[in-house]
Structure formats: structure tokens, C-alpha cells
Image (cartoon, rainbow, N blue to C red):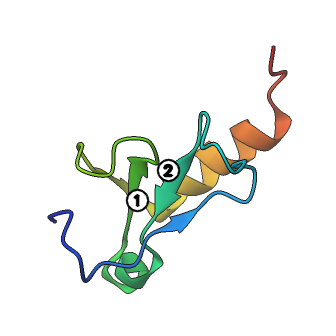
Amino acid sequence: MSNDAVTVWIKSSYSGPDGGQCVEVAPAYAPSGVVPVRDSKLSDGPVLMVSHSAFTGLVTLARTADVI
């Protein structure tokens, strides 16, 4: 998968207007069995392709983590 201009990326709802430490996902790829994830600050950077179950685990961890 490339970071092309056609791919629609959705930023985390926890992201503030200045970006911060957030990720974006490309939900249009979900039917293929993977969830592309990238750093919202590095739109031209690498894309991590994870399974649905791995993404669910990541979201669960983020929601329950004790963030300092």
C-alpha cells in the first residue's frame, strides 16, 4: 500500500488540532482483512498493516492504558 492522494485516512478522535501523538487509519481497506495504520505527523512515512484482531487489541490497549 502506498500513501497516495486517493486513500482516505481517518485521524483519531483523540487527536487535538495540533496533532500530537496520534494515528490515522484507512478504513476502506478493512474488507481486505487488514487495517492500515500510520503516524498522523508523518503522512509520507511508513504504513503498518495489521489484522483486524491486532487493531482491536491496539484500540483496547489504548483505551485502558494508564497514560502518563
Q: Which mark is residue 54?
A: 2
Q: Residue at x 18, y 71 (%)?
A: 4
Q: Between marks 2 and 1, how big is the CA–CA gap?
A: 5 Å
Residue situated in front as seen by the camera: 54 or 24: 24
Against 18, is 29 above or below? below
Quarter the C terminus occupies? top right
Does residue 44 appear left or right of residue 67 in this picture? Answer: left
Against 61, is 38 above or below? below
Does residue 56 appear left or right of residue 54 in this picture? Answer: right
Q: Are marks 2 and 1 in contact (CB under 8 Å)?
A: yes
Label 2 crowd bin: few (<14), some (14–19), many (20+), radius 10 Å: few
Q: Which mark is residue 51?
A: 1
Q: Amino acid at mark 1?
A: Ser
Label 1 crowd bin: few (<14), some (14–19), many (20+), radius 10 Å: some
Residue situated in front as seen by the camera: 49 or 13: 13
Q: Which image quadrant is residue 35 in?
A: bottom left
Q: Amino acid at mark 2?
A: Ala
Q: Residue at x 47, y 77 (%)?
A: 27
Quarter the N terminus occupies? bottom left
Q: Which image quadrant is residue 58 in?
A: top right
Q: Position of residue 37 (x, y in %)?
A: 41, 54
Q: Position of residue 42 (x, y in %)?
A: 34, 42
Residue situated in front as seen by the camera: 18 or 60: 18
Q: Position of residue 49 (x, y in %)?
A: 31, 55
Q: Residue at x 67, y 49 (%)?
A: 59
